[in-house]
Image (spheres, rainbow, N blue to C red):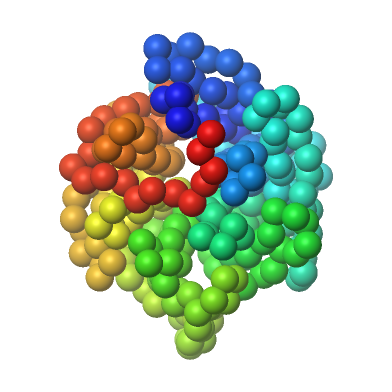
Amino acid sequence: MPDGSVIVVEIAAGRVTRIAQDGQKTVVAEPGGGPNGAAIGPDGALYICNNGGFNWRRDEAGGLHPAGQASDYTGGRIERIDLSTGSVETLYTYSDKAQLKGPNDIIFDRQGGFWCTDHGKVRDREQDRGAVLYGRIDGSGLTEVIFPMHGPNGVGLSPDEKTLWVAETFTCRLWAFDVTAPGCIKADPRPGAMHGGRLVGAPDGLRGFDSLAVDGDGNVCIGQIYTGAILVVSPSGEIVDEIPMPDAFATNIAFGGADRRDAYVTLSSTGQLLKFRYDRPGLALNEKRS
């Protein structure tokens, strides 16, 4: 945020929190459910992907992990939060195709629309197929653009906004989609990629992909889980860097500071926000800064 504070979602607590530079925390809003991805819109409000909540478990070290769809789950939603009052408005519960199951991550384009992922929900013996959607903040439409995907999570745009990046959690795959107009892609459906994307990266080993950000050079910086790190992938799919994190669940990264080289990383299982200096400036987001 312009004052140097950082706004984070706390999924398990069902709240949105502002963290000042000195570490002091204040509650922004308590939407309940499972507030997940967040982005500032062109009107200065905060837009939230609310996944509807999880059940939770703790590992032997006390770390907190999602354990499937919440027992009191009623569905996912896209919410608008007024940062001056904390009021929460539900903007969408359905796309043009289906009820939202587990909205996860969100990013705005230069035209003021947003791309978001619907990760779906996991139950004991079944799992939803996910999708990528495009919406308007006036509530006039949320359109399913990409389907099906297997646990789509992080979403981002290249510096020229001609490429949409989508990271799948469980397959640990990074997909690229050619953007032809706001909310439109050039798809090439084929076996193994019926959603029409181009496979850019699929690193081996025990990894999962969570949310992502793009740096000023166009590299995709992915929160890597199971083996906690920030994985930096070039637009051509080369691994530029793998920055270890002190938590197996490094779930998101965002850039701030005067030079956009302050990288903030959420460490989900231990409930920490980490800050470090990144080698390059992060890509400036499309947001109203006031």
Residue shown at the point (38%, 67%) measured from the top left: 160
Residue shown at the point (61%, 28%) measured from the top left: 16
Q: Is residue 2 left or right of residue 50?
A: left
Count of numbered badges drawn on the protein? 0
Q: Is residue 77 left or right of residue 40?
A: right
Horizontal and vertical percent position of residue 129? 63, 65
Residue shown at the point (52%, 53%) measured from the top left: 107
Q: Nearer the viewer, residue 251 or 84?
A: 84
Q: Nearer the viewer, residue 168 or 127?
A: 168
Q: Nearer the viewer, residue 19 or 274?
A: 19
Q: Is residue 146 left or right of residue 214?
A: right
Residue 136 quadrant = bottom right
Q: Nearer the viewer, residue 275 or 54?
A: 275
Q: Is residue 168 visible?
A: no
Horizontal and vertical percent position of residue 193? 47, 79
Residue shown at the point (64%, 39%) measured from the top left: 45
Residue 281 quadrant = top left
Residue 131 vs 191, above or below: the answer is above
Q: Is residue 157 visible?
A: yes
Horizontal and vertical percent position of residue 240? 18, 55
